[in-house]
Image (cartoon, rainbow, N blue to C red):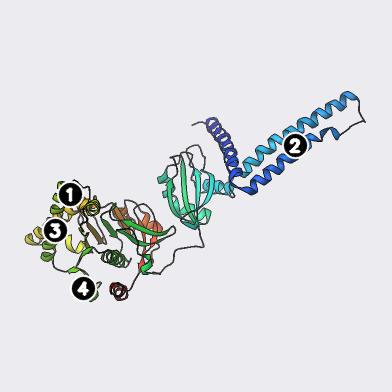
Amino acid sequence: MFRGEKERINHESQRKYLLLRMAMGIKCVFTNPLKLLVLVAYLLSSFALWHYRELVSITEFTDSVNELITTLIQYGIVAYAVFGLLFLLVIFGTPFGSKSTHDNFRRIGLVNSVGEAPSLLTKRKYKANKKVIIMEFISNGIPLNEWEDKRQRIETALNIHVAKVENGKNKRLTWLYTVPAKNGLSKLIHWHDKHLSKDTFTLVIGESFLGNETVDLSKNPHLLLGGSTGSGKSVLLKLLVMQCIKKGAEVHIADFKGGVDFPSIWHSKCQIIIEERKLLTLLETLVDELNRRQSILNESDYRNIDEYNEKTGNDLKRLIFACDEVAEVLDKTGLDKDQKELVTKIESKLSRIARVGRACGIHLILSTQRPDANILSGQIKNNIDFRICGRADNVLSQIILDSTSASDQIPKDAQGRFITHDGVVFQGYLFDDRCTFDNVQKGRR
């Protein structure tokens, strides 16, 4: 594109942006009493100047010159009233820091093909958390993935944390959910029962800049947790399973790391499996139950377990299968023929649950360090929509999230810090197994 053409597009964008500023200014006048007062005072001053214009008498010149000067004064007052009003509207419609934000975007290269940076349209507080400021931009043709790619540069340039990036009311608008750089996430957050969600099967996974971060199993039936050793996967998996138990689900846990992460208190709350053949038997039982529930839903013409329970008054419990380090179960490396056949059967049952478990209330929570194709088949992985990754390198982050977000946004020494598949960074809760379950028992007495 030629330089003249770029300049023409830039000038056209500036005119549109100026008109938009005026429109935003008019909106601000009707929502901000102070700005309305300033505008009224300005209009009154313009009216006063016009009303008393004839008091200005000039006798030093001829009548024709005096008439010319009077006319100029009148036009000057009109210009003052009109252009001053437009100027005030532009000022009212321009959020503080818009010029510096625009310049900083240009410095980090967040521009379109003709060199235009996004333009800040509004700033407002996030209703759910007053510490969060939503910055609304006219994106000027810059797609959402480019904002994500330059997320760290944006944070550095504006001295903020970006909690979330999303499109606004249309594709031309981009919303940044921001927090001042000084307000970082806590490195350690203890669990309290008050954090337990009151919604039927919504699980709390931690705290983000936007508040409690949750996952609704009725919408996201299966979860995949990934991350390097020591990132906190097992603690997060236990946090999720603990909430499932408190919500009355029937929970089964496969732990092939020696059972050290699940002390005796867990064995009284759920089934812990440490042998492959017992695991296959359990999965066969779950698949049989899945088929039975499918038949019930088909015969009764209900869409899912929640609708069935609500309309019939029955209580089909949700069934949770959690596996801590699924690679220990599904990795076929070095196995003999019989062992490989056993793993294949286990994989087949998991795949069946992953595909059709949603409506029947049967859920998978799988944790693994490296869920590549050799460990987790495409059929299983592709049916797990909600993915969470802890500390990871570029390759691991790409495998779990289909992006390098975990590598880019989670510090290398972080524990319990995770990022979801849609880019939300959060700190997982830490809890004491015995105290948490003792509270449950005391509450039931």
Provide the secondary structure element on which disc 3 rests: helix
Q: Which residue is mark 1?
A: 297
Whole-number angstrom distance, CA of label 1 to CA of label 4? 31 Å
| Mark closer to the chain start, 2 or 1 | 2
Provide the secondary structure element on which disc 2 rests: helix
Name the quarter where the C terminus is drawn.
Answer: bottom left
Q: Which residue is mark 3?
A: 346
| Mark closer to the chain start, 4 or 3 | 4
Q: Amino acid at mark 4?
A: Ser
Whole-number angstrom distance, CA of label 2 to CA of label 1? 74 Å
Q: Is residue 344 visible?
A: no
Q: Amino acid at mark 2?
A: Phe
| Mark closer to the chain start, 1 or 4 | 4
Q: Work out whether 227 lies above or below 153.
A: below
Q: Quadrant of residue 77?
A: top right
Dots 2, 1 in contact, CB < 8 A: no
Between label 1 and label 3, give the one nearer the viewer: 1
Dots 4, 2 in contact, CB < 8 A: no
**Residue 412 percent coordinates (x, y):** 38, 64
Q: Residue at x 13, y 62 (%)?
A: 282
Q: Is residue 97 visible?
A: yes
Q: In terms of depth relative to the viewer, which is nearer, 262 or 197?
A: 197
Q: Which residue is mark 2?
A: 47
Few, some or many residues within 10 Å of mark 4 (<14, 14–19, 20+) = few
Few, some or many residues within 10 Å of mark 1 (<14, 14–19, 20+) = some
Q: Which residue is mark 4?
A: 268
